[in-house]
Amino acid sequence: MAKSKPILVTLKGQEKFTRILSGFPETMGIKSGHVVLKPGENVGEHVTEAKEEVIVVLKGKAMILCGNDDEPIVASARTVVYVPPETTHDVKNIGGDILEYIYVTAAV
């Protein structure tokens, strides 16, 4: 497999979703994105299949709903949430301001 090269990405604007890295050939399997949600918005329930996910909250207040029976996780700026593989989850802005976060997924 070809060797990946270092990459610098500058986050621009306030689009709802911006892909940062998208896997091979940029990375060996990491994918990531920058998400901006208005108050009350959510990304929608989804599952990252066999991938782990890390959510890094940059601004605002998020509620992460994981699985059917798990307690919601409330996260604010400068916090990180780990979502295990095969876990259905949704991220919702529960604050009064913009929620901004970066997610990173990686194959197990």
Image (spheres, rainbow, N blue to C red):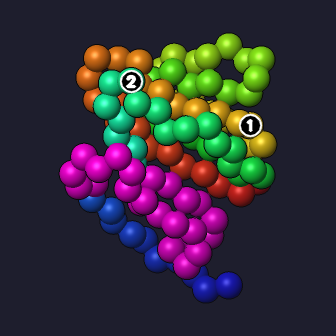
The tag on residue 1 is: none
Viewer-proximal residue among 28 and 46:
46
Q: Is residue 61 visible?
A: no
Residue sitting at the far left: 13
Examine the rendered structure and indicate whether residue 50 appears above or below residue 68: below
Amino acid at pointer 1: Thr
Q: Residue at x 56, y 25 (%)?
A: 64
Examine the rendered structure and indicate whether residue 103 appears above or below residue 95: below
Viewer-proximal residue among 51 and 68:
68
Q: Is residue 1 left or right of residue 26?
A: right
Mark 1 or mark 2: whose residue is earlier in sequence: 2
Please state the extent of the stretch shown in magenta in the rendering: 11-33
Q: Residues within 10 Å of mark 2 (few under 14, many from 20)?
A: some
Identify the element where label 1 is drawn.
loop
Q: Is residue 69 left or right of residue 104?
A: right
Residue 42, percent across and down?
46, 33
The part of the image, by quadrant, that contains residue 101 is top left
Q: CA distance from mark 1 to mark 2?
A: 22 Å
Q: Is residue 12 left or right of residue 104?
A: left
**Circle 1 residue:** 87
Q: Residue at x 25, y 46 (%)?
A: 14
Q: Residues within 10 Å of mark 1 (few under 14, many from 20)?
A: some
Residue 92, percent across and down?
47, 27
**Circle 2 residue:** 40
Q: Residue at x 23, y 55 (%)?
A: 12
Residue sitting at the far bottom: 2
Tell me, yes or no, whether the highlighted magenta stretch contains residue 73: no
